[in-house]
Image: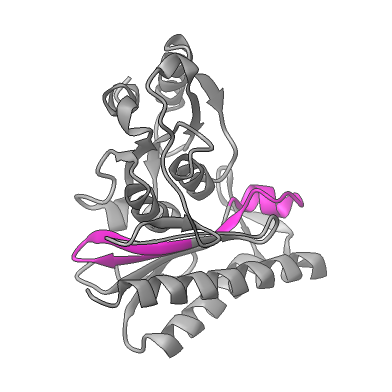
Amino acid sequence: MTDLPRRRDAAAAIAVEAAALAARLRAEGGGVASLKGAQDFITEADGATERFIRDRLARDFPGEAILGEEMGGAADGTGPLWVLDPIDGTSNFARGGDRWCVSIGLVMGGRAVAGAIARHAPGEVFAAAEGHGATLNGAPIRAAPTTDIGRAIIECGWSLRVPIARFHRMSEAVMAAGAGLRTGGSGALGLVEAAAGRLDAYLELHINSWDAAAAIAIAREAGCWTNGFDSGDWLASGNPVGVGAPALGARLAALLEA
């Protein structure tokens, strides 16, 4: 698709506005969380922010399909398909923290090809379009050049959709390899921080499409090793995800299978 940069820029602008809206709604009392499931939080701001994003996408790209965390939608990926998470890191958001973001990805032919992720505080926008590189606030980003896993910092996301024993095995394998272990409560941010070289890798045994569609496009354009997250039935069912320093790819793939 020749207009991917335009779509990337539109997603970035919408994500920035949506993040500002979510922050304002939280300040006005819309950040009180309830549970959709075990450790699966939602706030009034989630729904309002998703509606805002959907309205803006419908205005700018009329008739195109949208899949969102809170309101569902099409998941066949024949495209173009916008895949969004209005607030990734809702547990952090609901507690007044800043480790949350808005994620808007674009899928074509079942593959994530562009997207943007915006943080309100600090003000950061990660963005990419296939074939056009990845940026943070307009400046190019690249995966870390790390070659020694014993010097790596790896974030491991966790999900109750897989047995907790598997998360324990992966975490233990990461530490046994000599890497530093982190977890931050936002898969989208962990993925793009690996893309920017702030982390050497991000691994999670299961993540949903809306959490990672934008981030996987950004990570690939930043030169990361990726595990092929956007394959199979990923849009409807999610997948394991791994991104990181390209020289560590084989070791990271093995850690996902630990």
Identified at 32% across, 33% down, the residue is 246
Q: Magenta residues, as a range?
A: 89-116
Left or right, 240 with reference to 157: left
Q: Is residue 94 visible?
A: yes
Q: Is residue 103 magenta?
A: yes
- Give 178 or 196, whichever is nearer the viewer: 196
Left or right, 42 with reference to 106: right
- Give 247 or 254, whichever is nearer the viewer: 247
Which quadrant is home to the C terminus?
top left
Outermost right residue: 28
Image x and y of residue 58, in percent? 42, 86
Q: Is residue 69 visible?
A: no
- Give 198 or 61, whichever is nearer the viewer: 198
Left or right, 167 with reference to 76: right
Which quadrant is home to the N terminus?
bottom left
Image x and y of residue 197, in percent? 48, 38
Image x and y of residue 71, in percent? 46, 70
Identified at 47% across, 12% down, the residue is 178
Q: Is residue 111 magenta?
A: yes
Image x and y of residue 87, in percent? 57, 60
Outermost front residue: 139
In the depicted structure, whether residue 205 falls above or below residue 4: above
Identified at 37% across, 85% down, the residue is 61
Q: How many marks?
A: 0
Left or right, 82 with reference to 1: right
Residue 107, quarter of the rendered image = bottom left
Residue 240, quarter of the rendered image = top left
- Give 111 or 169, whichever is nearer the viewer: 111
In the depicted structure, whether residue 246 falls above or below residue 8: above
Identified at 42% across, 12% down, the residue is 177
